[in-house]
Image (tube, helix red, strand yellow):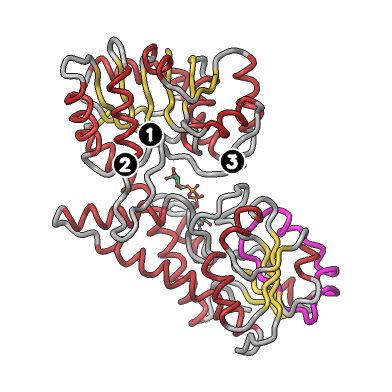
Amino acid sequence: MRVAMIGTGYVGLVSGACFADFGHTVTCVDKDASKIDRLHQNIMPIYEPGLDDLVATNVKDGRLSFATDGAEAIRRADAVFIAVGTPSRRGDGHADLSYVYAAAEEIADLMQGFTVVVTKSTVPVGTGDEIERIIRERRPDADFAVVSNPEFLREGAAIGDFKRPDRVVVGTDNERARAVMAELYRPLNLNETPIMFTGRRTSELIKYAANAFLAMKITFINEVADLCEAVGADVQQVARGIGLDNRIGSKFLHAGPGYGGSCFPKDTLALVRTATDAGSPVRLIETTVAINDARKKAMADRVAEALGGDLKGRTVALLGLTFKPNTDDMRDAPSLDVAPALIARGATVQAFDPEGMEEAAKLLDGVVFKSGPYDAVEGADVVVILTEWNQFRALDLDRVKLLLKQPVMVDLRNVYRPDDMKARGFRYTSIGRPD
Ligand code: UGA
């Protein structure tokens, strides 16, 4: 199959490289010439484990190419994927669809023969209808079908998620489009991945409902963690105890500083807006959004408490700035709330992150960036683990203790064990576990 992928952001690049690896001929198109230039030199615009090798191999084998001008790729494509950004619109939280619609217009003007137009971007229910209308208006006699095919990729694990997904969801009523999509994903039949065909609106909603459910699950365990602290229970054991029930499942039950990232905050908000507009509010998700926002802000209080309540003149070492490990993505990361709140309370913040510091430097005023975890810890009154990068799981704790002014750790990811930390002489607090 011939594929044109519009947008070389996270989703477009990973999906394009993986489709090429499946054996299809893929052109990834992006208007940003410097990005395409760098991709030609195998420099990835994002940090994703294994992506550079996957891209290099498929480029070498002639299945993957990059272009700023999509004309030729779109003309020849069996399927054109729209994988451009859908950020939250300023002011109202609705998804901003201007890039999606611009891509639809471009596709309309260029496509030839039967073409399947696929939305990979996360788009509100009804967007497929609007794309179809836009294309039909510009090209009344064009032969095409618009399909919804949401992605369920986690940053840091995106290639594995693409190649070994729990399921693939394809929203279309068009038989020919269905055959094209089945062919594109045919290699997955080997792992017996369910490919679920639904109506287009249903498929669009599945994506939002999945992310909202996961965000709600995390928020649930975060509130249970607070309750554990209040009543002297252990949230990790509660999570295991409930997660072993297959109806609940053990994943996404790690309590922490609140969820962040490019998807959950944006998608929960967009679902709330869609549901309100449709006159069918999703109150559980409205509450999830509010609890999570408040939680991220409240993390600075925990740090203050660990130091007796006052942060004036204190130095805080922050380990981890990205919203989760194995990514350089800073979007809606808890650090964007925590660091300014610490500074506002009079603390000096010195921070280290393995991949996120370049981006963090643009977003965090007044933070002193250090070149390694031990540099960050040196001379600090407290060390705070904010993102569970592997290198923070294996710190030389004796060295950390010597470098700190006093042995205080606030572990917002429950990386260490309270009894062990106590035995090592730390004053240690974590999330939802007895100290
Ligand atoms: C999420 C979904 O997991 C993907 O299925 C989906 O495709 C993607 O959004 C998307 O819509 O594009 P991602 O944002 O990359 O993926 O990261 P997650 O691993 O889901 O983590 C999101 C946030 O939740 C992070 O801040 C993480 O620290 C937090 N989290 C996750 C917890 O606090 N506890 C958990 O148990 C799990």
**Ligand 1 has an atom within 8 Å of the beta carbon of the residue at disc 2:** no
Asked if disc 1 and disc 3 are in contact, CB closer than 8 Å, the reply is no
- First in sequence, mark 1 or 3: give its number: 3
- Give yes or no for contact between labels 2 and 3 (Cβ–Cβ under 8 Å): no
In percent of width and height, residue 94 lies at 29, 53
Position of 163 with respect to 304 (left or right) is left
Residue position for label 2: 98
Q: Earlier in the sequence, mark 1 or mark 2?
A: 2
Residue for badge 3: 46
Amino acid at the residue labelled 1: Lys
289 is higher (above) or lower (below) than 188: below
Query: Which one is closest to the eye, mark 1 or mark 3?
Result: 3
> Label 1's element?
loop
| Highlighted range, magenta | 383-408
Q: Residues within 10 Å of mark 1 (few under 14, many from 20)?
A: many
Furthest residue in direction left, as rendered? 279
- Which circle, 2 or 3, is nearer the viewer? 2
Amino acid carrying mark 2 in the image? Ser
Q: Is mark 1 within 8 Å of ligand 1?
A: no
- Residue located at (48% from left, 15% from top): 24
User: Looking at the image, which residue is at 38% across and 59% down?
Assistant: 216
Q: Which residue is mark 1?
A: 120
Amino acid on which disc 3 is placed: Ile
| Residue 43 visible, this orientation | yes
- On screen, 143 above or below 15? above
Q: Earlier in the sequence, mark 2 or mark 3?
A: 3
Decide if residue 343 is on the left or right side of residue 283. right
